[in-house]
Image (cartoon, helix red, strand yellow):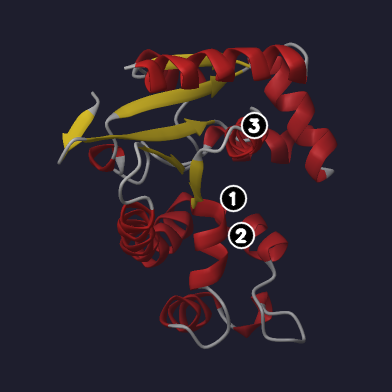
Amino acid sequence: MIKSTGGEKMAVIGLTGGIASGKSTVAEILRELGVTVIDADVVAREIVEPDRPAWRDIVAYFGAAILRPDRTIDRQKLGQIVFSDPEKRAVLNRITHPRVIERMRELQEAAVTRLAGKDKLIVLDVPLLFEAGMTGMVDRIWVVTVRPETQLRRLMERDGLSEADARKRIAAQIPLAQKAARADRVIENEGTVAATRQAVERLVAELRGQ
């Protein structure tokens, strides 16, 4: 849906996928095409900086052992804990998701203001768009997909994980096939970066044409 606001056009796209599906590559292509991209991963790091409310809640629950010497959260240590324990992962999500959503809304509103007088195409780059219940913030959903075996291999290579640990992290998210079934557009990312770029360019041209 393209919204009309005082003669201007605006569309908010939710970009998501699975871990190691190539969503970040798609987001970077969008930026190169001049699209405003708001990155939930950046926001998630911002809200857990030392002494912020989410940081205090996380340390209170998980203990100081998850901190580095500079008092930042050791994401690898925390990840090992939460991806092995669904209950603890749920606690972490309850601490972080509302704060991420609040900050994403602020950044989205700021982007709309900044783009005043222009047609607005804003992309919310959110790995857990479905899991965090953020679909109501967007007009359309684009899902980046790869085959399960590709996802597993890329994750192991990217993060240096064992197959067992990689499978745990993939299993913590809604399966890619289910996300794709709920998407308005699916971006296949099995091929080259050039092929992915062509697919993204077509989607952006489609929206801008509307």
Amino acid at circle 1:
Ser
Residue displayed at 48% across by 33% down: 16
Q: Which residue is mark 3?
A: 29
Give the SS element for disc 3. Answer: helix
Q: Quadrant of the N terminus?
A: top left
Q: Earlier in the sequence, mark 3 or mark 1?
A: 3
Give the SS element for disc 1. Answer: loop
Q: Nearer the viewer, residue 182 or 34?
A: 34
Q: Looking at the image, can residue 85 be seen? A: no
Query: Which label is found at residue 84?
Result: 1
Q: Residues within 10 Å of mark 1 (few under 14, many from 20)?
A: some
Comparing labels 3 and 1, the label whose residue is closer to the camera? 3
Point out residue 64 in the picture as x, y percentages from the top left corner: 62, 84
Q: Quadrant of the C terminus?
A: top left
Amino acid at circle 3:
Ile
Point out residue 46 in the picture as x, y percentages from the top left corner: 54, 70
Q: Which residue is mark 2?
A: 81
Q: Earlier in the sequence, mark 3 or mark 2?
A: 3
Tell me if label 3 and label 2 are in contact, CB under 8 Å.
no
Point out residue 126 in the picture as x, y percentages from the top left corner: 46, 43
Mark 1 → mark 2, Cα distance in angstroms: 6 Å
Point out residue 131 in the picture as x, y percentages from the top left corner: 37, 40
Mark 3 → mark 2, Cα distance in angstroms: 33 Å
Query: Which label is found at residue 8?
Result: none
Q: Residues within 10 Å of mark 2 (few under 14, many from 20)?
A: some
